[in-house]
Image: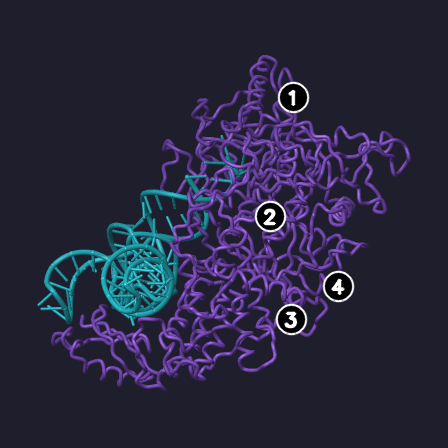
Chain colours: A purple, B cyan
Amino acid sequence: MTDPTPAPASSASESTESPEPTEPRAARPSAPDEALRYRPAEIEPRWQTRWAELRLYETDLHDASRPPFYLLTMYDYPSGDLHIGHWYVKTPTDALGRFHRMRGDNVFMPIGFDAFGLPAENAAIKNRIDPRDWTMHNIDVMRRQLRTMGAMFDWRHEIVTADPSYYRWNQWLFLRLLQAGLAYRQKSAVDWCPNDGTLAREQVEGVDRHCWRCGAKVEKRELDQWYLKTTAYADELLDFSTIDWPEPIRIMQTNWIGRSEGAEIAFETAPSDHHAQPETLRVFTTRPDTLFGATFMVLAPEHPLVAVLTAPERKAEVEAYVAQAADRTEIDRLSTDRPKTGVALGAEAINPIAGERIPIYVADYVLGGYGTGAIMAVPAHDERDYDFAVALGLPIRRVVAAPGTEAETPLEAAFSAHTGDERLINSGDFDGLPADEGGRAIVARLAEAGRAKPTVTYRLRDWLFSRQRYWGTPIPIVYCEQDGIVPVPEADLPVLLPDTVDYRGSGENPLNRDEAFLATTCPRCGGPARRETDTMDTFMDSSWYWFRYLSPDKDDGPIDRHLVAAWTPVDQYTGGAEHAVMHLLYSRFFTKALRDCGLLDQDEPFKRLFNQGQILGADGERMSKSRGNVQDPDELVARYGADTVRLFLMFMGPWDQGGPWSPTGIGGVHRFLNRLWSVAVEPHRREPGVADTEPADLAAAGQELRVAAHRTLAGVTVDYEGFRFNTMVAKLMELTNLLMRYRGTAVAGGPDWQEAIRLLLLMLAPAAPHLAEELWSRRLAEAGEGWRSIHLEPWPAFDTQLVAVQTIELPVQVDGKVRDRVPMTAGLDAAEVERLVLARPKIQAALGGRPPVRIVHAAGRLVNLVTR
RNA sequence: GCCGGAGUGGUGGAACGGCAGACACAGCGGACUCAAAAUCCGCCGUCCGCAAGGGCGUGCGAGUUCGAAUCUCGCCUCCGGCACCA
């Protein structure tokens, strides 16, 4: 999704020098029969075709006989080709879906493309091609690449957001939000990228404030913009109680929303020669308890009262400062270690509780966009105010002190500790009150006079929704000289994006020059009107796409209420954590907004979320064509087959961890599949050079196999449930290695062997679907049974008798150090265990004649003899 | 600066209060081969020791516990997010 990978620069892949000396398909003269060799290049396309013919992955959304399981993976921006990172997200997700399906769920796993967005336009400008052609071509390439994964995507439900059949409903939904009062237009300073136009706050990254897509430095510009009222849901968005999401994401969203409780306090300005009229200056503070310590006030440079209150003799300096603040590069403005600057307005305000007159300053450390854009400055108890006061030589008055602190002890830094024991000082009637209580009392006293009220503010801003770009959903609005802003009637949707665009090599929106698009009539008065040329942020597309997947062709509404009720919220969503505060927050907002528009009956979009890690380039940097560190999966698939690539990605490490890409080890996974193949296909064969050793006890060996198979099954089941694919693969390797040991002996081919192979294939089916299917079909044919896809088999149940531990080797510690391992039957009582343990010579030696003063039993796991 | 996450063999990792290093990669040795490749088998934290065995080991330092890679506190390093939010 919204992958910022730039347009394909040049034909990329210089043939990656593989560190593997392995050549998997080298001729093996010792294998006489071609049909007995594992050849993924032959079996994988064959089964993919067969599955498609059988419509194996076309989910019947109306099948009520099985529980629905909506498995969603973030759709992709069609940047032109898949890299290994796409496989890293999608193939374990597919394994999870297949596992759920075998467990009896009706799994729906759709796929689509986030097709609007800037790279298409950048490519268009650069290469003089149509963004639509570029996008659609890329989608074709990616469809083909996605199919090589062998994933169970239901392609009948594919979505391409740049298609009018999709974006028409963006427009329809926007009109509903507008009706509901959740969309509005406002002129305001916005972050502006010279290449990419307007950026959302979230799209500006880093200390130097660069564009998240192109990296260019972001400027400020005043524009009329469309906004969506995300802030209306700030409190509801803080509630995660009904969803199971990773804690880091919940924390990031919580911080992003940034709720603070405090009070709004109204100060009056003191009448002066140049401004006799008192003005009200509202401030927001989280520390009303420190009101008596306010020794000055600060307005943000954008504050409307700056110009009003400035004394004539201060005018030049104040205006210069404001202008400088506006121009100041964002690097300076945002750097927290920059010395505080500011200038006095030459005006004073009156502290509403103390009656004291305090000077008013303008300073850029106060933000125009937060709270009221003005603060009461309490240097004694706020670090920033302290720095400012020191820089300008302003008074600092302590009003809160810990018990036992001398009230007049000079402060060397702002005192903002909060243990609950602090008391008010220098605060008139309020002296001696605990800080919390004092704050409430001060607000209450002011509230009586209408000069304060408890207030909550948020860091979260409304969603800046307009983009000055061509390649997006046109906002369905016209501007009429008579009627002003007029929504396009539903019946006239979609407002189509014109097919031909005239780029002139600039990032400026070509719609602004497109007369055929611009000129229209007012739906209200029929007079001449102009169309809105802004298009929607592409996060609009991704804010509801999972609803549309259920009924992508529905042409009388955006969503199918029945299917939505039956299938959503999404049961499991997978994708990258880079969307923590954008897509994942907008989607939650949007779901709630649609609910309040009466279109849905649910509060959250995604019940459960899993963030897989990110695969970086071999250099540890983000994979991108420009860095030349992209791993092409096609190359690996050609060499090893899709199943090996899938399994390798699962085996690399914990799925949520990611890490730098390294193909080291893929050969090991491939060898594993070859071994698995050979134990299944040629159980009786013995490799040249292997000694002829029959197990001494055939029955015991058989039992060992059965026990191992069932224990593997028990473990693998838990691993799939917990997304622990790496240990799942390791367990399958262990079982295969055990089978390998008995290959070519009398155990091979027997019932226990057959049982182990059967379970092994079923366990492997979600992860390596082609190989499992091939071996399964051979097995059925050999047994003379009719063919049935392994992917329609139920997940096997393990035998609890076999899984239960019969004998153990109990580790025995003396004073915490392991000294021996004692074999015994499981489940012995403590006395018996003790007797066995103490009889061991090694233990006696370790005790050295000292009797244990205490014996700790961890039943079945360990015994610790303590002599101290 | 604040908020997250992570530090375990040569490497990816496993174990998540109870046998540290499962499973792999790389390396070393062997079998097979005229030979090589492929395949199969074995060894593989570190130090002392011929061995048996023992010492030391999970970023550093304390602590809790019979017992800590795992829990607590304080540091260090790396990665991600936020960044004057009053």
Chain identity of mark 2:
A
Q: How would you rate the neighbour count of disc 2 (Cα within 10 Å): few for under 14, some for 14-19, many for 20 or more? A: many
Q: Residue furthest right?
A: A526
Chain identity of mark 3:
A
Quarter of the view holding residue A79? top right
- Res A435 seen here: no
Query: From mark 2 to mark 4, how far is it between C-alphas?
Result: 27 Å
Query: From mark 2 to mark 1, how far is it between C-alphas?
Result: 48 Å
- Res A217 seen here: yes
Are tags 4 and 1 found on a single chain? yes
> Which residue lies at the image location 65% right of the left edge and 58% below the top edge?
A110
> Which residue lies at the image location 81% right of the left edge and 40% below the top edge?
A487
> Which residue lies at the image location 53% right of the left edge and 80% below the top edge?
A782
Q: Is residue A806 above or below residue A443?
A: below
Q: Which residue is mark 2?
A: A1
Chain identity of mark 4:
A
Q: Depth-wise, is mark 2 or mark 3 nearer the camera?
A: 2
Q: Which residue is mark 4?
A: A562
Q: Which residue is mark 3?
A: A67
A447 and A80: which one is in front?
Answer: A80
Query: From mark 3 to mark 4, how far is it between C-alphas?
Result: 15 Å
Q: Earlier in the sequence, mark 3 or mark 4?
A: 3
Left or right for A646, reference A462: left
Chain identity of mark 1:
A
Question: What kind of residue is marked 4?
Answer: His
